[in-house]
Image (cartoon, helix red, strand yellow):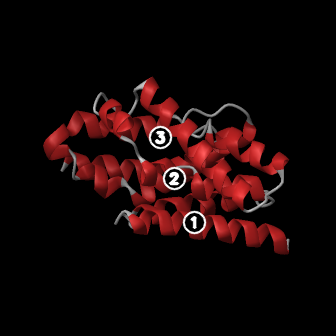
Amino acid sequence: MKNINNLYKKTEQFVIDSFIKIGKEQEVKHLLRTAYWIKQLKKNADEALLISAVAHDIERAYRKEDVKKIIKSGFLSKDFLRLHQERGAEITADFLKKQKADNKLIEKVKQLILRHEDGGNEEQNLLKDADSLSFFECNVNKFLDKAETKGKEYVKEKFEWMYNRITSKKAKERAKPLYEDAVKKLDR
Protein backbone atom coordinates (compact mmCIF):
# COMPACT_ATOMS: atom_id res chain seq x y z
CA MET A 1 0.00 0.00 0.00
CA LYS A 2 2.95 2.32 0.57
CA ASN A 3 3.81 2.39 -3.16
CA ILE A 4 0.17 2.96 -4.04
CA ASN A 5 -0.06 6.01 -1.85
CA ASN A 6 3.30 7.26 -3.10
CA LEU A 7 2.35 7.10 -6.81
CA TYR A 8 -1.10 8.51 -6.11
CA LYS A 9 0.42 11.35 -4.05
CA LYS A 10 2.90 12.13 -6.84
CA THR A 11 0.08 12.24 -9.36
CA GLU A 12 -2.02 14.42 -7.08
CA GLN A 13 0.89 16.84 -6.68
CA PHE A 14 1.45 16.87 -10.46
CA VAL A 15 -2.20 17.79 -10.98
CA ILE A 16 -2.12 20.51 -8.31
CA ASP A 17 1.11 21.98 -9.70
CA SER A 18 -0.26 21.90 -13.26
CA PHE A 19 -3.33 23.94 -12.35
CA ILE A 20 -1.44 26.34 -10.08
CA LYS A 21 0.97 27.00 -12.95
CA ILE A 22 -1.88 28.32 -15.12
CA GLY A 23 -3.58 30.18 -12.27
CA LYS A 24 -6.57 27.85 -12.02
CA GLU A 25 -6.02 26.20 -8.66
CA GLN A 26 -9.80 26.29 -8.07
CA GLU A 27 -10.04 23.41 -10.59
CA VAL A 28 -8.15 21.12 -8.20
CA LYS A 29 -11.00 20.76 -5.70
CA HIS A 30 -13.15 19.02 -8.31
CA LEU A 31 -10.39 16.50 -9.00
CA LEU A 32 -9.69 15.80 -5.34
CA ARG A 33 -13.39 15.35 -4.67
CA THR A 34 -13.67 12.95 -7.61
CA ALA A 35 -11.05 10.77 -5.90
CA TYR A 36 -12.99 11.14 -2.64
CA TRP A 37 -16.17 9.93 -4.34
CA ILE A 38 -14.35 6.97 -5.87
CA LYS A 39 -13.42 5.90 -2.34
CA GLN A 40 -17.03 6.35 -1.18
CA LEU A 41 -18.49 4.37 -4.06
CA LYS A 42 -15.87 1.60 -4.05
CA LYS A 43 -14.13 1.02 -0.74
CA ASN A 44 -11.44 -1.18 -2.29
CA ALA A 45 -10.68 1.11 -5.24
CA ASP A 46 -7.28 0.33 -6.70
CA GLU A 47 -4.40 2.65 -7.48
CA ALA A 48 -5.28 3.04 -11.16
CA LEU A 49 -8.83 4.12 -10.37
CA LEU A 50 -7.70 6.66 -7.77
CA ILE A 51 -5.02 8.07 -10.06
CA SER A 52 -7.55 8.31 -12.88
CA ALA A 53 -9.95 10.16 -10.62
CA VAL A 54 -7.47 12.82 -9.56
CA ALA A 55 -6.08 13.25 -13.09
CA HIS A 56 -9.15 12.77 -15.31
CA ASP A 57 -9.42 16.46 -16.27
CA ILE A 58 -5.69 17.23 -16.49
CA GLU A 59 -6.19 18.20 -20.14
CA ARG A 60 -7.75 21.45 -18.90
CA ALA A 61 -4.35 22.50 -17.51
CA TYR A 62 -2.71 21.89 -20.90
CA ARG A 63 -5.60 22.90 -23.18
CA LYS A 64 -4.60 23.68 -26.74
CA GLU A 65 -6.22 26.16 -29.11
CA ASP A 66 -7.93 23.48 -31.20
CA VAL A 67 -9.86 22.26 -28.14
CA LYS A 68 -10.72 25.83 -27.12
CA LYS A 69 -12.28 26.35 -30.56
CA ILE A 70 -14.21 23.07 -30.51
CA ILE A 71 -15.65 23.60 -27.02
CA LYS A 72 -17.35 26.77 -28.29
CA SER A 73 -19.70 24.44 -30.17
CA GLY A 74 -20.81 22.97 -26.84
CA PHE A 75 -19.68 20.72 -24.03
CA LEU A 76 -21.44 17.76 -25.66
CA SER A 77 -19.49 18.04 -28.90
CA LYS A 78 -18.20 14.55 -29.72
CA ASP A 79 -14.94 16.08 -30.99
CA PHE A 80 -14.44 18.00 -27.76
CA LEU A 81 -15.19 15.01 -25.52
CA ARG A 82 -12.90 12.77 -27.59
CA LEU A 83 -9.96 15.22 -27.54
CA HIS A 84 -10.47 16.05 -23.86
CA GLN A 85 -10.34 12.38 -22.89
CA GLU A 86 -7.53 11.40 -25.29
CA ARG A 87 -5.24 14.24 -24.28
CA GLY A 88 -5.95 13.74 -20.59
CA ALA A 89 -5.04 10.07 -20.95
CA GLU A 90 -1.84 10.93 -22.85
CA ILE A 91 -0.72 13.58 -20.35
CA THR A 92 -1.33 11.27 -17.40
CA ALA A 93 0.36 8.30 -19.08
CA ASP A 94 3.42 10.42 -19.90
CA PHE A 95 3.63 11.54 -16.29
CA LEU A 96 3.31 7.97 -15.01
CA LYS A 97 6.01 6.76 -17.42
CA LYS A 98 8.37 9.37 -15.99
CA GLN A 99 7.57 7.97 -12.55
CA LYS A 100 8.50 4.50 -13.84
CA ALA A 101 5.04 3.16 -13.13
CA ASP A 102 4.13 -0.33 -14.21
CA ASN A 103 2.94 -0.54 -17.85
CA LYS A 104 -0.18 -2.45 -16.83
CA LEU A 105 -1.16 0.33 -14.41
CA ILE A 106 -0.45 3.01 -17.04
CA GLU A 107 -2.64 1.22 -19.59
CA LYS A 108 -5.49 0.87 -17.10
CA VAL A 109 -5.30 4.56 -16.17
CA LYS A 110 -5.37 5.48 -19.86
CA GLN A 111 -8.43 3.32 -20.48
CA LEU A 112 -10.25 4.83 -17.53
CA ILE A 113 -9.53 8.43 -18.51
CA LEU A 114 -10.37 7.69 -22.15
CA ARG A 115 -13.96 6.90 -21.08
CA HIS A 116 -14.53 9.16 -18.06
CA GLU A 117 -17.15 11.24 -19.88
CA ASP A 118 -19.31 8.49 -21.33
CA GLY A 119 -18.40 5.40 -19.34
CA GLY A 120 -18.17 1.87 -20.63
CA ASN A 121 -17.15 -0.89 -18.26
CA GLU A 122 -17.88 -0.98 -14.51
CA GLU A 123 -14.85 1.07 -13.46
CA GLN A 124 -15.20 3.60 -16.30
CA ASN A 125 -18.81 4.09 -15.19
CA LEU A 126 -17.66 4.48 -11.60
CA LEU A 127 -15.20 7.22 -12.61
CA LYS A 128 -17.93 8.95 -14.61
CA ASP A 129 -20.30 8.77 -11.63
CA ALA A 130 -17.69 10.15 -9.22
CA ASP A 131 -16.95 12.92 -11.71
CA SER A 132 -20.63 13.89 -11.75
CA LEU A 133 -20.93 13.85 -7.97
CA SER A 134 -17.89 16.06 -7.67
CA PHE A 135 -19.22 18.36 -10.39
CA PHE A 136 -22.36 19.01 -8.34
CA GLU A 137 -20.28 19.71 -5.26
CA CYS A 138 -17.64 21.92 -6.86
CA ASN A 139 -18.65 23.28 -10.26
CA VAL A 140 -22.28 24.35 -9.98
CA ASN A 141 -21.50 27.99 -9.20
CA LYS A 142 -19.06 28.15 -12.09
CA PHE A 143 -21.89 27.13 -14.41
CA LEU A 144 -24.48 29.33 -12.74
CA ASP A 145 -22.18 32.24 -13.56
CA LYS A 146 -22.37 31.22 -17.22
CA ALA A 147 -26.17 31.57 -17.26
CA GLU A 148 -25.90 35.28 -18.04
CA THR A 149 -23.66 34.81 -21.06
CA LYS A 150 -24.63 31.35 -22.34
CA GLY A 151 -28.24 31.28 -21.16
CA LYS A 152 -30.12 29.27 -18.57
CA GLU A 153 -30.92 26.51 -21.07
CA TYR A 154 -27.21 25.87 -21.67
CA VAL A 155 -26.58 25.56 -17.93
CA LYS A 156 -29.67 23.42 -17.35
CA GLU A 157 -28.56 21.11 -20.16
CA LYS A 158 -25.17 20.72 -18.47
CA PHE A 159 -26.79 19.95 -15.10
CA GLU A 160 -29.17 17.41 -16.66
CA TRP A 161 -26.40 15.75 -18.63
CA MET A 162 -24.15 15.45 -15.59
CA TYR A 163 -26.99 13.93 -13.54
CA ASN A 164 -28.51 11.67 -16.19
CA ARG A 165 -25.18 10.11 -17.15
CA ILE A 166 -24.79 8.63 -13.65
CA THR A 167 -25.01 4.85 -13.88
CA SER A 168 -25.05 3.44 -10.36
CA LYS A 169 -28.07 3.63 -8.11
CA LYS A 170 -25.88 4.54 -5.13
CA ALA A 171 -24.28 7.49 -6.95
CA LYS A 172 -27.63 8.62 -8.37
CA GLU A 173 -29.15 8.69 -4.86
CA ARG A 174 -26.26 10.76 -3.54
CA ALA A 175 -26.33 13.12 -6.52
CA LYS A 176 -30.09 13.72 -6.59
CA PRO A 177 -30.27 16.37 -3.82
CA LEU A 178 -27.18 18.11 -5.23
CA TYR A 179 -28.72 18.14 -8.71
CA GLU A 180 -32.08 19.38 -7.43
CA ASP A 181 -30.36 22.17 -5.48
CA ALA A 182 -28.41 23.20 -8.59
CA VAL A 183 -31.59 23.39 -10.66
CA LYS A 184 -33.34 25.45 -7.93
CA LYS A 185 -30.44 27.91 -7.89
CA LEU A 186 -30.63 28.21 -11.66
CA ASP A 187 -34.38 28.88 -11.58
CA ARG A 188 -34.05 31.74 -9.08
Nearer to the camera, 178 or 121: 121
Q: Position of residue 28 (x, y in %)?
A: 47, 64
Q: Determine crowd level at label 3: few under 14, some 14-19, many 20+ residues with C-alpha closer than 10 A.
A: many
Looking at the image, which residue is at 18% across and 51% down?
Answer: 188
Q: Amino acid at mark 3?
A: Tyr
Nearer to the camera, 12 or 42: 12
Left or right, residue 136 beside residue 95: left
Q: Position of residue 54 (x, y in %)?
A: 59, 59
Q: Amino acid at mark 1?
A: Phe
Mark seen at residue 163: 3
Q: Tell me which numbered mark, 1 or 2, is placed earlier along the sequence.
A: 1
Residue 109 visible in image: yes
Looking at the image, which residue is at 75% across and 72% down?
Answer: 6
Q: Are marks 1 and 2 in contact (CB under 8 Å)?
A: yes
Mark seen at residue 58: 2
Residue at label 1?
14
Locate the N terminus by quadrant: bottom right
Q: Determine crowd level at label 1: few under 14, some 14-19, many 20+ residues with C-alpha closer than 10 A.
A: some
Q: Amino acid at mark 2?
A: Ile
Question: Label 2's element?
Answer: helix
Nearer to the camera, 112 or 66: 66
Disc 3 versus disc 2: distance between alpha carbons? 22 Å
Nearer to the camera, 181 or 17: 17
Left or right, residue 66 beside residue 174: left
